[in-house]
Image (spheres, grey):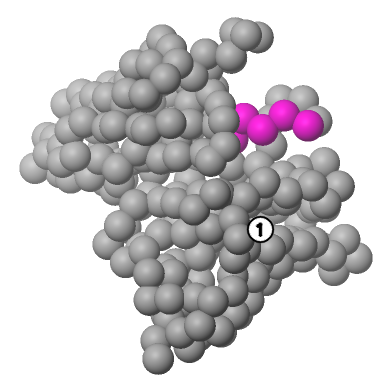
Amino acid sequence: IVMTQSPLSLPVTPGEPASISCRSSQSLLYSNGKKFLDWYLQKPGQSPQLLIYLGSNRASGVPDRFRGSGSGTDFTLEISRVEAEDVGVYYCMQLLQTPYTFGQGTKLEIK
Amino acid sequence: QVQLQESGPGLVKTSETLSLNCSVSGGSIRNYYWSWIRQAPGRGLEWIGYIYYTGGTNYNPSLKSRVTMTLDMPKNQISLKVTSVIAADTAVYYCARGGGAMPGNLDWFDPWGQGTLVTVSS
């Protein structure tokens, strides 16, 4: 499954919203209703950390300004008000079928 | 709080075998999937494969013939071997715990280790 993110670069003013799109080459909706799409953030110099799982569930400790949504093939990560600590590269990942695959990454930077 | 720590040689010669360990502290490897994911310098993320705590494995076909994952329950450790390495195997290698809402589910990877850089060179 090919994962395509856009944009690849996202300059944002602090306090403003941001949105990242992730499109999959086939539906990530399983027969049980789960959408096997996660979002990860790799902050500079760090390993990736889980933000959102199963399309719309925030991981423990993730601020509620992060919101994941989407249908079978089109998913969105929204940040309601960007803060300086949100800089890094955001990856979507599909876990519907192996080999699991990632999007190319979206680099969020502060203007 | 579960923590993962990768370890192994930082330099491997071309055509030789890359061997890494992932030590798990603060929790058991039982009931989870344990995955290896790598990131070539300046590049994105590539899933290598996973091993379930029962020993079942699933590898990325792009590496399948060269990859072996094992686990050591008493040591709470997961291992990765990649044979016949080439320059393109140069990457930061991460181990990550896979889990879900119910035992046996794989809905997310969390946490990840800090990663270890492996350079392949002749």
Q: Against B100, is A43 above or below?
A: below
**Chain under disc 1:** B
Q: Is residue B42 left or right of residue A3?
A: left
Q: Residue under circle 1?
A: B3
Q: Residues within 10 Å of mark 1 (few under 14, many from 20)?
A: some
Report x, y in % for residue A69. Answer: 40, 15
Query: Which residue is outermost to the left?
Result: A111
Magenta span includes B116? no
Would you place residue A63 above or below residue B122 in this image? above
Task: Assign the magenta stretch its main secondary structure.
Answer: loop
Extreme residue in the bottom direction: B122
In-image side of A80 versus B62 (left or right): left
Q: Position of residue A105 (x, y in %)?
A: 29, 42
Give coordinates of residue A31: x percent, y percent.
62, 9
Depth order, front residue of A16/A24? A24
Magenta segment: B104-108
**Number of marks in picture:** 1
The front one of B26 and B96 is B96
Q: Residue furthest front?
A: B65
Q: Amino acid at mark 1?
A: Gln
Residue at 52% x, 13% y is: A29
Q: Which quadrant of the view contains residue B122? A: bottom left
Q: At numbered mark 1, what does the secondary structure look like: helix, strand or loop?
A: strand
Image-quadrant location for residue B73: bottom right
* Above or below: residue B94 compared with residue A6: below
Residue at the spot 66% in from the left edge and 58% down from the top edge: B3
Residue A87 appears in the rendering:
yes
